[in-house]
Image (spheres, rainbow, N blue to C red):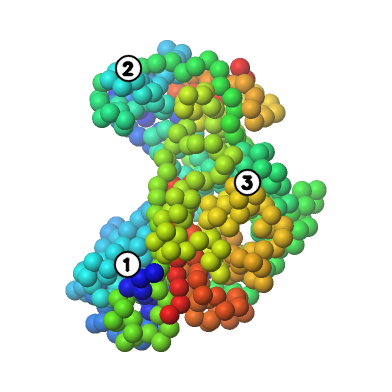
Amino acid sequence: MAKDVAVIGVGQTYFVRGYEGSIRELAFEAFREAMQDANLTNKDVDASIFCSAPEYDKQRSPAGVLAEYLGLVPQPTFYVETVCSSSTVGVKIGYSMIKAGLHDIVVVLGFQKMSEITSAESQERMGRGGDIQWEAPFGTMMPAYYALYAQAYLAKNGLTLDDLRDVRVKAATYGQINERAVYRKGVKPEDFDPNNPDAKMAGPVASPLRVGDCCANADGASCIILANAEKAKVFSKKPVWILGIGAASEVVNMAARPDFSKGIQVAKAAAGQAYKMAGLGPKDIDVAEVHDCFTIAEIMAYEGLGFAPEGDGKQLIREKATYKEGRIPVNVDGGLLSKGHPIGATGGSQIRTVVLQLRDEAGPMQVKDPQIGLNHNIGGVGLYGNVTIFGRD
Amino acid sequence: MGFDKFGRKSFTSFTKTGKFVDLLGEGKVEGTVCKQCGAKYFPPRADCAACLSKEMDWFELPKKGTLETFTTAMYAPFGFEADAPYTMAVVDFGGGLKAFARLAKDFSDPKIGMDVTVRPLKYDDGQLSFEITKA
């Protein structure tokens, strides 16, 4: 496997509700941390890529204003968007630019300030990440879209609501020890008790998904700094190499989707490409970050990535195989469910976690001696699938 | 063609498939079929992705399909709050044809695999849509 492009710096803000600053200041926090991590000055950076989902803040063409605030002018800069997977795609493009020899060092900055608008407005915008001509007129929103998959998947595969609950319990186990997560509380099985009106996770959102099955909106930014092999050796004691990248797309419209009971398909194609490029398989992965925007999404990710056979993702959560001490630790930073999901920042945040794991710098979340890490980041309702595989030096 | 009459609230003003709304007004729920290669589309398309033709005909959806999946949304996005709760679903007509819509308000006890159909719907404010009912 080729070691041509490395991550040499990572940064992430605290994920919070109601960040008391503007998007440029939010972006700067993640940027400062990543630049200090990589020991770089602004002049070392050859290009920047900014990533977010549009219409949360009012800034059009955000790359210009953010590049100025980060002191990355006059270097080239541009904006990348694939909703929830924007910053992973930013990393893919940064990788490509370095691999092509255009640039030596590229900054990829994902950001989102969701609290600029109300929760109902946010749901409407997320719904419009689907098909606005034929579906949004029915009043679609993200939980309902994922619930369509959950309903069919549960009916076919023997997955239960208790299994979904246990995905959330696992996420909260690690959210409690991740100081950057928006949701720091523990979650107990009884918090999902439908017969207890005080159970905080039990309320229905879009059947069969409940409050506890859904991740929270948050404000946040992430920053990933990429370098070619030569610069990585100069600037980084612990470069983490990009070994494999896969990406795929799915049709938008629910009416054109294949069998819902088989779950989201887009990750399978992306994973296949990434494994092939890296010359690795699911059994080689020591730690993974997957896109658990909803509990059902984590179960489907287990299967899409080949960690479990099709229809049998439930076994991993039942056997606690995806806990920190398990066979394949998944989302041991709390995942989107506890960490929060500031759309454009999420992919970069996942990649940061994988990089810290591979550098043995994940603190209380550290998995024992991982060599290979994987990131699975989905945009929209299984619309854009992205899988990236990383290895230590 | 004025497409702003489609659905509870439309986000698209014009489309070459605007006739879809006129057909709803005539009591028909129709997709398009490519005159050149025969590919069928629902929701309708003005252009064929299979052979790149722009010569399309209209065809009526089959009378009966099965309920593939559904969800009842307890909360609604901005602009739809008055409707909640409502149930959205996917109907599988076979042969690659599916439809996404809300279940009719009086649709009780939905179950995956049950026989269903679609019919046009006119809201009190004049908006035109379609909904899923039991077959």
**What secondary structure is found at the residue carrying circle 2?**
strand
The answer to whether dots 3 and 2 both sit on one chain is no
The disc labelled 2 sits on which kind of residue?
Answer: Asp
Give the CA distance from mark 3 to mark 1: 34 Å
**What secondary structure is found at the residue carrying circle 3?**
loop
Q: Is residue B51 left or right of residue A33?
A: left
Can you tell which of label 3 and label 1 is closer to the viewer? 3
Task: Work out whether mark 3 precedes mark 1 in sequence or the reverse, and give the earlier one.
Answer: 1
Label 2: chain? B
**Residue A314 in view in this figure:** yes
Q: Is residue A88 above or below residue A269?
A: below
The answer to whether dots 1 and 2 both sit on one chain is no
Tag of residue A95: 1
Tag of residue B57: 2
User: Is A84 in front, or is A251?
Assistant: A251
Give the CA distance from mark 1 to mark 2: 46 Å
The disc labelled 1 sits on which kind of residue?
Answer: Tyr
Q: State the image coordinates of residue A25 (x, y, percent, origin top left).
A: 38, 73
Residue A156, image quadrant: top right
Q: Residue at x 32, y 67 (%)?
A: A95
Label 3: chain? A
Q: Which residue is mark 3?
A: A311
Q: State the image coordinates of residue A307 (x, y, percent, origin top left).
A: 58, 58
Q: How many numbered tags mark residues here?
A: 3
Residue A69, image quadrant: bottom left
Residue A79, image quadrant: bottom left
Q: Is residue A124 above or below residue B119?
A: below
**Residue A25 in view in this figure:** no
Q: Residue at x 32, y 17 (%)?
A: B57
Q: Residue at x 78, y 57 (%)?
A: A190
Q: Is residue B44 left or right of residue A124?
A: left
